Amino acid sequence: MAPKRKLEANEFQFFGPEEKDFLGLKTLLSSYLNGEQYDSTGLVDAIISEGDVGSVVKTDEDDDPIAVMAVLNTIQYKDVAFMQQLRQFMLGNASAYSQQLAQSLDGPGTGLLINERLLNSPPSLAPPLLQFLLNEIKSRAAQDDEDAKNFQYQRLLLMTRIFVDSSVGGVPVLRSSGAPAPSAAGVTKHAKPGSSASRSVPQTAQVSQ
């Protein structure tokens, strides 16, 4: 088995999403739309069907995932119930930018980034999750098959929660500590049975603010 890296006094392992993760992922993503009902089963099935593009984080191989990061092509899944529900939710909560957002969702080369973690998950999980995903997208897009075009992304959309500071008139304020991202070097993702060897992150992901 590939080596593990200890993060914040706990050992976390990175795997590709599999069928055995279905119930854990469904629970993890149940509140993805702030408690609104949606086709979470369809979302989880899509994440699992993406194969090696995407990761789940566990404390042990047989445990439920505590985090997931995956990407779904908005055009590829545009007629599926869960994507239509996510689209409606996003447009309804970003009314000031609804036209620009709709153009991105309906345009070619758009990937919806699914990033969900348990509340008490350490922030240091984020850099390796993102680096794995970017590496896997690049590798999958370069393959010589019909599905490769679904991974040739021009943009990635991330839906995330924000907290509004009422002291500044309800205007969201984004702050950055300016601290460098934790290094992802040495973190290993476990390969699925029958897939290629485990992959390691070469360097921390450099994500622009």
Image: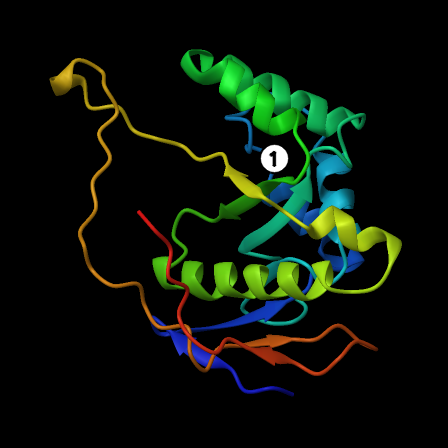
Indicate the secondary structure of the residue bearing disc 1. loop
Packing grade of label 1 (10 A; few <14, some 14-19, many >=20) is some
Measured along the vertical axis of the image, is residue 50 above or below residue 128?
A: above
Of the 4 image quadrants, the one containing the N terminus is: bottom right
Could you tell me the amino acid type at mark 1?
Ser
Can residue 194 be seen in the rendering of this structure? yes
User: Looking at the image, what colour scheme do you see?
Assistant: rainbow
Q: Quadrant of residue 16?
A: bottom right
Q: Quadrant of residue 31?
A: top right
Could you say where residue 75 lies in the image, as x and y percent from the top left? 74, 33
Q: Is residue 31 toward the left or the right of residue 151 in the image?
A: left
Nearest the camera: 133 or 85?
Answer: 133
Could you say where residue 189 lies in the image, as x and y percent from the top left? 59, 74
Could you say where residue 141 lies in the image, as x and y percent from the top left? 71, 58
Nearest the camera: 135 or 172?
Answer: 135
Measured along the vertical axis of the image, is residue 27 above or below residue 185?
A: above
Nearest the camera: 128 or 20?
Answer: 128
Can residue 93 be seen in the rendering of this structure? no
Q: Quadrant of residue 145?
A: bottom right
Nearest the camera: 43 or 113?
Answer: 113
From this viewpoint, which residue is outermost toward the right? 146
Q: Is residue 187 toward the left or the right of residue 141 in the image?
A: left
Residue picked out by circle 1: 30
Could you say where residue 123 lies in the image, as x and y percent from the top left? 36, 57
Q: What residue lies at 72% left-to-right and 28% top-to-bottom?
A: 82
Q: What residue lies at 50% left-to-right and 20% top-to-bottom?
A: 100
